[in-house]
Image (cartoon, rainbow, N blue to C red):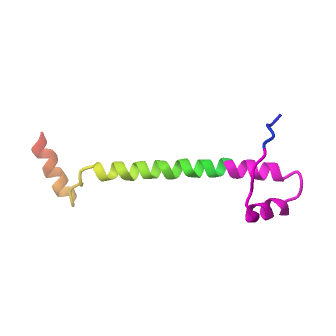
């Protein structure tokens, strides 16, 4: 059985939940919590990737320059 919890909702959130038919409210709130958590995790991962991208060296402007750089390192 799922745990029962008490939460406080602002007026706008309560209007949304109240507009749902009984029996769908818990599923709706549960799905909203999980979906929001997943979205927050994705945003945090995107921010970490953006930060890592700034630390990477800038690639050469053209494929010719890239070939030259690779040749020089070998």
* Quadrant into which the C terminus falls: top left
The residue that appears at 14% across and 49% down in the rendered structure is 69
Where in the figure is residue 61, as x and y percent of width and height? 21, 60
Answer with left or right where residue 49 lies relative to residue 31.
left
Tell me, yes or no, whether the highlighted magenta stretch contains residue 15. Answer: yes
Where in the figure is residue 46, as x and y percent of width and height? 45, 52
The residue that appears at 74% across and 57% down in the rendered structure is 9
Tell me, yes or no, whether the highlighted magenta stretch contains residue 26. Answer: yes
Answer with left or right where residue 11 lies relative to residue 71.
right
Q: Is residue 5 above or below residue 21?
A: above
The residue that appears at 83% across and 34% down in the rendered structure is 1
Specify the farthest residue to the top.
1
Specify the farthest residue to the right.
22
Q: Nearer the viewer, residue 9 or 60?
A: 9
Where in the figure is residue 35, as x and y percent of width and height? 65, 51
Secondary structure that dominates the magenta span: helix
| Chain part drawn in magenta | 6-33
Q: Nearer the viewer, residue 16 or 70?
A: 16
Answer with left or right where residue 63 lies relative to residue 25.
left
The residue that appears at 31% across and 53% down in the rendered structure is 54
Q: Nearer the viewer, residue 37 or 66?
A: 37
Where in the figure is residue 29, as x and y percent of width and height? 75, 51
């Amino acid at each position: 059985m799922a745990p029962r919890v008490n939460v406080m909702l602002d007026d706008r959130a309560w209007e949304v939940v109240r507009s749902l038919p009984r029996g769908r409210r818990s599923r709706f709130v549960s799905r909203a919590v999980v979906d929001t958590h997943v979205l927050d995790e994705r945003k945090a991962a995107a921010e970490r990737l953006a930060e890592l991208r700034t630390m990477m060296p800038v690639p050469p402007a053209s494929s010719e320059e890239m070939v030259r750089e690779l040749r020089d390192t070998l």
